[in-house]
Image: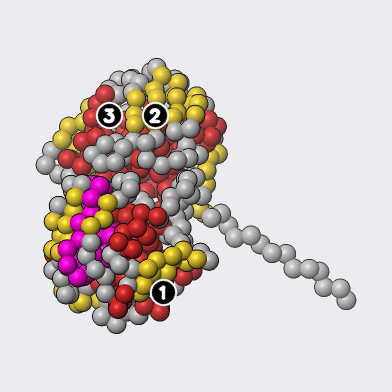
Amino acid sequence: MDKYIINGGKPLYGEIEISGAKNAAVAVIPAALIVEGVCRIENIPQISDTDMLLTILSEMGAEVRYINRSTVEIDCTDIRADGAPYDLMRKIRASYYLIGAMLGRFGYAKTTMPGGCNFGVRPIDQHIKGMTALGATAEIKGGFVYAQAPEGKLIGSKIYLDKISVGATMNTMIAAVKARGKTTIENAAREPHIVDLANFLNSMGADIRGAGTDTIKIYGVESLHGGTYAIIPDQIEAGTYMAAVAATGGEVRIKNVIPKHLDCISAKLREMGVDVDEYEDSVVVRRTSPLHRANVKTQPYPGFPTDMQPQISTVLCIADGTSVVTEGVWDNRYKYISELKKMGAEVQVDGKTAVIEGVPYLTGAPVLACDLRAGAAVCIAGLCARGETVVEDVIYIERGYEDFVGKLRSIGADIRIETEPDSIEIAAPVIV
């Protein structure tokens, strides 16, 4: 198992380039299953989640070919519904997008319950609601999700999501693209990656309107054709490095971003005393003075993203005064707080609220990456802490950050990967 060794206390300077958005790529790749022809997808992040999804499609019979490190061609012409590798599906949260994709392609789907980070209960009831509204029968049984469209074809319908759900919005969009008639999704999520998925599908011949608003209309088409599409930059990756600069001090230009997508993050950092200058496709983050306290509440887009809550909370641990963080999206997303306390953070959690008393500094310690964003958060803590921090279970971090260590080293961080040697088995003595 790899671990990260971080020697903190060094401000960050330089430039860093953001990769394609994880949350867009993990929906676009399964959506390629319903396309007839070759999809050329550019700006795919090199992370374990995308690698696993491409492997799943390949084992189902798709032809997958890398053109370069961030461009892949996918041809699902000969894909098979019965070729799904369930052992891989259960390891990744985004495998649930295969429910909508397989229903749209075959009229039938069998997938495992999704895996991924465990930071609380994340049911798929709204996904099931979307599929059943389109006419499918769907049930969860024995750890599998089974869905069947009548006569192999979904029927357009009006769907009101009981709660704003990014995954359910995207999954229903994928399923409805080839359904008969018109589908309307109300109370839809509005995140940038939802717009990106709609743009990908539209570029392949779909007719989706209203993505980015709370009402999305999908007019079913007979088929989708191949084409080329580039994934948007990753809002959360950019925000993570912005938070790292805020924690350590220094000045970093973060390139290949859409500044508008970062508005909620930039605004909160400015409130904390961090300078954020916006340019056409980059932001410059600068922190030269002490951090101020702030209150944060996570909300669906365009509110402050839940996937940035651990990172911003870590920065607030060294801000002057008392800050209050309220998690408005998920339950039980504060598991990482116990790791920050090992480093000297003063945080009290009550349900969905964390009260943070700023301390002058954190101290390096052995910590765990509890999940993807929590892992990034403890690394940020290590970067600003005094002394050495050892981060274990970094496999979670590599699910969503491309070349995390290399990018941090390029802006002056003292961080390295250390690989634990394989255990050596000692043979039993031979008795003569």
Q: Earlier in the sequence, mark 2 or mark 3?
A: 3
Q: Which amino acid, mark 3?
A: Lys
Outermost residue to the bottom: 78
Q: Earlier in the sequence, mark 2 or mark 1?
A: 1
Q: Earlier in the sequence, mark 1 or mark 3?
A: 1
Number of residue marks: 3
Mark 2 Cα within 10 Å, few/some/many (few <14, many 20+)?
many
- The answer to whether any part of residue 190 appears in the image is yes
Q: Which residue is mark 1?
A: 84
Residue 196 magenta-highlighted: yes
Mark 1 Cα within 10 Å, few/some/many (few <14, many 20+)?
many
- The residue segment tinted magenta is 170-198
Question: Which element is circle 1 on?
Answer: loop
Outermost residue to the top: 321
Q: Are marks 1 and 3 in contact (CB under 8 Å)?
A: no
* Observer-nearest of 183 and 195: 183
Residue sitting at x 32%, y 72%: 149
Label of residue 325 in the image: 2
In the depicted structure, whether residue 415 falls above or below residue 144:
above
Q: Which amino acid, mark 1?
A: Ala
Rendering coords of residue 44 (x, y %): 27, 60
Residue sitting at x 39%, y 25%: 324
Question: Which element is circle 3 on?
Answer: helix
Residue sitting at x 44%, y 33%: 352
Q: Which residue is mark 3?
A: 268
Mark 3 Cα within 10 Å, few/some/many (few <14, many 20+)?
some
In the depicted structure, whether residue 313 falls above or below residue 431:
above
Front of the two marks 1 and 3: 1
Question: Which element is circle 2 on?
Answer: strand
Rendering coords of residue 408 (x, y %): 35, 43
Q: Which amino acid, mark 2?
A: Val
Give me the C-alpha separation between circle 1 and circle 3. 43 Å
